[in-house]
Image: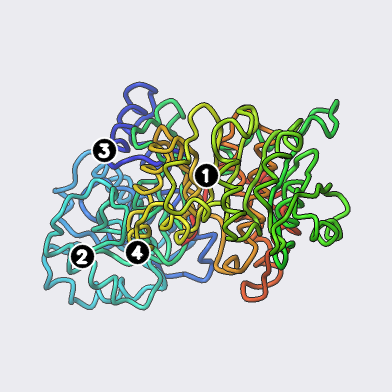
Amino acid sequence: MKIVSAAEMRAIDQATTERFGVPSLTLMENAGSAVALFIVRDYPQAERIGVVCGKGNNGGDGFVTARKLAEAGRAARVLLLCEPGELRGDAAAMYDRLMSNPMPFALAKIPPLIVRDVAQLESADAAEILASDLIVDAVLGTGFRAPVSPLYAAAIARMNASGAPVVGVDIPSGADADASEGMRGIVARADAVVTFTAPRPAHVFAALTNGPTVVVPIGSPEQAITSTLGLHLSTPADFASMLAPRARESNKGSYGHVLVMGGGLGKAGAAAMAGFSALRAGAGLSTIATPKSVLATVAGFHAEVMTAPLPETGEGTISIRAVETAAALLEGKTVVAIGPGISRNRETAEFVRSVVKPGTVPNRCAMVLDADGLNSLEGVADQLKGSGRNIVITPHPGEMARLTGLTIAQIQANRLEVARKFSREHEVIVVLKGHRTLTAAPDGTVWVNTTGNPGMATGGTGDVLTGMIAGLIAQHPQDVFKATALAVYLHGLAGNVAASALGERSMVATDLARFIPQSFLQAGRAETAEFRIPA
């Protein structure tokens, strides 16, 4: 799903009408209907609903919402922040439709409350509307440009002070749709947001609501939805071809062979989780190459995973001598994952740097670098060059800080820019983990993931992700970037399934591997009519 700017959203609406023949009134009718449906479905106890409308098209959406709520049997009342004569275009048409609707429902008997100045917001009628069971914020939409007028600011303040849940239409009033960080100034609070066609950057990055942001289609064809931002929100629909049923004529050789190089004394489980997760993600074969002294331990975790011994250091980690055996191990492999449990031993770090150099791993074999595999490149990140080959790195903010020389605070303050810059300069795919994990390609394209939860903040979940990325790449070596983005999405979804079953506090990394099958099933069955972005 493309993420679009406010200007691009206006162009999409215009193209939908002018090029594809969908009347703008139809788009507005569909938008308001979607908001009403969300409220009826998600707030079944909200009987009295106040709809606060501005004079622009956002207010027009609000008029439709009020009419549809009334048709659904809710006691909806409109508070209009202008004279009806100030309404223009589609908003004026929807106001007329609201007022002329012949149905004998309550709204037809209670005309909108017209508020022209701040003092009128103190009236008993205004207070009654603002004391409803739920408030719909239809004051300002994506087209808003600062500053907020005194009347609108006062109305926003009244909504914010209300104890009722607030549902924002399109975007909370006063918010900058193009912002990629938290809001400043006068902004309406929102317990949920219903937006249309495609999200804007603020919907994804700016924490506009403490509840869901629901993106619903309202009639714009896919051909009309264009963007120059290079940002995509990961949704099941985007990965439909990769989630499709397998061909009947299949065998284990059809789905690639993953090699995991990692593990060591005290960290055998990390390599084991990565190797097994590659199989759970659908790889046909998975082999773990690990120091010979821990091979039996690694082999004992999962019967389905194959193992191979590597020369080791005195500390039981991978020795530099393992480079000599790498060529034989890589024969027939589709992807190699390096790092889970590999340790920060100096000789082991030298092994990683040697393997990462061009020529050691055949260009046909994709590479995934994680954990201490990345830490081995601290101070020498210039050695990491992906030109002519597929390399994926999966740093958390601390690892990214070590790779770039920036502080963690600098990474977190500029996640999108940091991921894009490193990806472009090193010609690698960057998976910058964290809330809204980013998957960045050298051409500037970024997939933004919204699955996952705080229960995944536990040791080993990154090893599961590494295995899943390798497993998806093994099946789709022709599209490493998209396979990586899908793995990130499914990894977070498995965490969500695990949290639903176990709670966030008790989750451990192996729970994610356990619920990978359910994540595939959920993604494959996902509804395409709408997509919910969690807070």
Q: Position of residue 191 (x, y in %)?
A: 41, 66
Q: CA distance from mark 3 to mark 2?
A: 21 Å
Q: Position of residue 282 (x, y in %)?
A: 75, 42
Q: Estimate how packed mark 3 is, as few (under 14), some (14 to 19) or many (20 or more) residues with alpha carbons within 10 Å.
A: some
Question: What residue lies at 62% left-to-right and 55% top-to-bottom?
Answer: 493
Q: Is residue 470 placed above or below 161 in the rendered structure?
A: above
Q: Verify CB contact (< 8 Å) between mark 4 and mark 2.
A: no
Residue that numbered label 4 is attached to: 409
Task: Tell me the amino acid under the disc marked 2.
Answer: Ile
Q: Verify CB contact (< 8 Å) between mark 3 and mark 2.
A: no
Can I make out residue 37 in this image? no
What is the secondary structure assignment of the residue under circle 3? Answer: helix
Q: Is residue 208 placed above or below 447 in the rendered structure?
A: below
Circle on res. 186: 2
Nearer mark to the viewer, of 4 and 1:
4
Q: Position of residue 525 (x, y in %)?
A: 68, 45
Compare marks 4 and 2 and give the one earlier in the sequence: 2
Question: What residue lies at 38% left-to-right and 52% top-to-bottom?
Answer: 404
Residue that numbered label 3 is attached to: 7
Nearer mark to the viewer, of 4 and 2:
4
Task: Tell me the amino acid under the disc marked 1.
Answer: Ser
Circle on res. 234: 1
Nearer mark to the viewer, of 4 and 3:
4
In-image side of 76 versus 429 (left or right):
left
Task: Tell me the amino acid under the disc marked 4.
Answer: Ala
Q: How is the image coloured?
A: rainbow
Q: CA distance from mark 2 to mark 1?
A: 30 Å
User: In terms of image quadrants, where is residue 504?
Assistant: bottom right
- In this view, the residue farthest toward the right is 303
